[in-house]
Amino acid sequence: MRKTVRRRAVGGLTALLALLLPPALTAGASTPSADDVIVLRGANSAEGIAAGEGTTFYAGELLTGDIFRGDIHDGKAKRFIDVPEGRMAVGMKADTRNDLLFVAGGTTGKAYVYDTDTRKQVKEYDLAPGFINDVTLSSDGAWFTNSAAPELYFVPVSRRGELGAADVETLKVGGEAGKPLQPGQFGFNGIAAADDDDILIVAHTQNQALYAVDPDTGKSNRIKGPDLKFVDGILVKDRTVWAVQNMANQVSRLKLSDNFSSFRVKDVITSKHFDVPTTVARFGDTLAAVNAKFGQQPPPTQYEAVLVPAWD
């Protein structure tokens, strides 16, 4: 049984919002065609993306919480779920077997679960103050990160898609990953379950690192390797990690050691269409990364998903 620890309140929401607006950098230097860009038609912001069934993807409108749906084959995406005011949509994952979409709620401190068949909300969870940034699915539930606190939040989900009660388990993370943050910095960001759910791999933006976290005890160990500057969302398959480095406009493909203690960089994936990508979804040999375009003035009038090779 997982150890549930006391939830710690976190302030500084104004500083967290400011972190969404760093100065933009120059994009990478590969040369895909215009067909590799899928416009999120009508979006006023973007941050999260998740693979759905087949070639379907879901993307979130960061500042409103609305959900878009698109297809990487037909190259189109449009608003799919129009949510109530006051929400945000950051990282997300789709449970395609049960038609559920799990969404991290940013500064709301909440998590949302939507039915992708009916487009209705299934459940809303109060997690903790701070910035609920990303989510991963394991065999028995969903794990969420908080960029303002060294904590993870677990929502139980059965194999048939039955959601747990309103109470949420809070796992306090120890070790280096659990140390206090510097003012105005993001801590935990992307998250992925690995090694048959025995390990949670968590990206730590301030530390430019990945950590292996024990989901029962909260013990963390830094996964040794080069610094991952601007690390944001991550995706894990077996011992391959795709780590999005937002302001660097790149996705690094990493190979983990057999015991998950270290990694090496296999490739760095770039695109001339990257404009502060934040999260990524995988469709076989193709990655879809969403552009967040943080820090641009005047505000952008278009947001999109960019398709690049996965190079698995």
Image: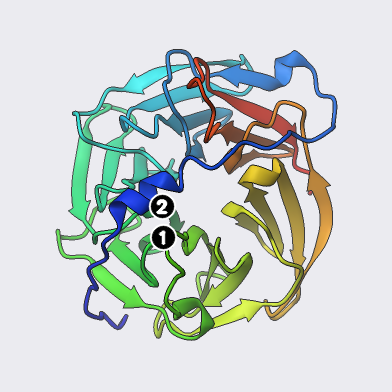
Asked if the residue at tag 1 contacts the one at tag 2, i.e. Cβ–Cβ closer than 8 Å, the answer is: yes
Q: Which residue is mark 2?
A: 133
Can residue 311 be seen in the rendering of this structure?
no
Residue 191 x, y percent position in the rendering: 50, 60
Query: 164 above or below 273?
Result: below
Badge 1 amino acid:
Ser
- The disc placed on residue 221 is none
* Label 1: element kind: loop
Q: What is the CA distance from the residue labelled 2 to the residue labelled 1? A: 6 Å
Residue 294 x, y percent position in the rendering: 52, 35
Q: Residue at x 30, y 83 (%)?
A: 3
Badge 2 amino acid:
Asn
Task: Answer with the quarter of the image where residue 179 lies.
Answer: bottom left
Q: Which residue is mark 1?
A: 147
Residue 264 x, y percent position in the rendering: 81, 67
Looking at the image, residue 67 sits to the left or right of residue 10; the answer is: right
N-terminal label among 2 and 1 = 2
* Label 2: element kind: strand
Can residue 83 be seen in the rendering of this structure?
yes
